[in-house]
Image (cartoon, rainbow, N blue to C red):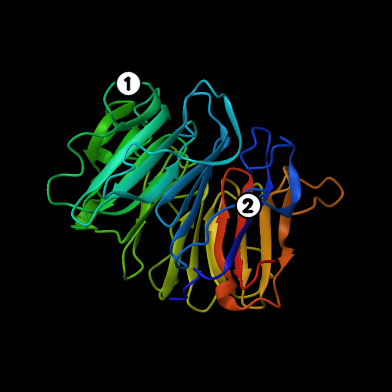
Amino acid sequence: MTNATSRTFSLFSFGSNAQCQLSHSSAEDIDVPTRVGVWLPSPGSLDDVCVSSNGNHTLLLISGEVYATGDNTYGQCLASASARRISTFHKVDTCFAGTTFRASVVAAGWDFSVVIASSSTQDEIYVAGYGPRGQLGIGETTTAATPQLIRNFPPCGRRVRQACAGMGHTLVVLDDGTVYGWGQSRKGQLGPTNTSCAACWTPARVFFPDGFVPVKVVCGREFSAGIDGAGRIIVLHSGPDRHGVLDVPSQETVAGWTDFQCGWTTLHILLSSGRMVSWGNNSHCQHVPKIAPPFLRISCGSEHTVALARDGKMYAWGWGEHGNCGPREDDQVNVGHASPVFDVVDAKADEIVYLGAGCATSWIGYCVEGGI
């Protein structure tokens, strides 16, 4: 793992910015990767930076510290809801500040946020924002203008291994392989045992069929999915499969997978060869283009993907109405080819420390000696 503490970190963003969710105070869409104009600390390692952007707000995690920007109507930026909008990234004064806990995971839902705080012995989960269908996980409370602790979860002795949030639900994978979730559940996104009600208001066990134990889970708009180490994929969804998310590829097709991600209605696998496999909705050209270079990293947003290729360039495709796939060509909304958006061919591999995509937003974290 490459240490980045002696380097200068710069975060670039482009795409939808009506609520300053790109951390640019202009509140106008941006179609060229543009450096966020606030000072941010350098991450301690390549694993210490994460952006989660959904709805009209964005959470940024750097080395245990949380920053937020964008729409704060319901307190989803983890700041007082009296400030309806946060125009640039601000450091969140977390309720666990001054303790041995540090933020380890951030996940942005449509109008809500999830922060996992970790110490050497336990994890705590805090939520904020708006959850009319259980998105907060704290009982039948629909608004949390300040971060609230989900009490008595995780179960005693268990640690959080992974967490993610979609438009209206959240999934958490624990260290024993069990999966829990809360929020919208009518479409089967929280498993077949939780479809009898429209919402799960507190964390509930999410059961995959046939004893399946995922190593990674993802949240789509109205589905969830998991993949195990052997490449077996199970999608949790009930009702009509309008987008084909249940048409999962075979284990043989995704053998040697390295990453598993999804958008609102599309799923993607990155293979060790650099090839991508996509299925589900392709109405906005969300599937990997037929002509594409081998990729090192991918990140899937609501209906677009950004990818770092082995040729050292950044590519994007999918729904690009807000400039999140780079400059629009002749007012074209859908980008059906791998469009280069940020040429980093002269960069060393470890200088790109983060690649992210959200709700029509795209993100690039760049770390070099002496700044850029």
Q: Of the numbered discs in the image, which one, if any, rests on residue 362?
A: 2
> Does residue 109 lie above or below 344 as drawn?
above
Residue 206: where, in percent of width, then height? Answer: 25, 44
Q: Can residue 264 be seen in this view?
A: no
Taking depth in this image into account, of 235 and 341 the one nearest to the observer is 341
Residue 213: where, in percent of width, then height? Answer: 24, 59
Taking depth in this image into account, of 331 and 358 the one nearest to the observer is 358
Q: Is residue 188 visible?
A: yes
Taking depth in this image into account, of 352 and 206 the one nearest to the observer is 352
Q: Which residue is drawn at 55% across and 75% down?
A: 350
Q: In which quarter of the image is residue 259?
A: bottom left
Left or right of 269 on screen, residue 136: left
Q: Which of marks 1 and 2 is nearer the N terminus?
A: 1
Within 10 angstroms of label 2, few (less than 14), some, or many (20 or more) residues? many
Give the residue pinned by disc 1.
141
Q: Residue furthest left?
A: 156
Q: Of the numbered discs in the image, which one, if any, rests on residue 53?
A: none
> Which quadrant of the rendered structure holds the C terminus?
bottom right
Q: Quadrant of residue 333?
A: top right
Left or right of 48 on screen, residue 171: left
> Which quadrant of the rendered structure holds the N terminus?
bottom left
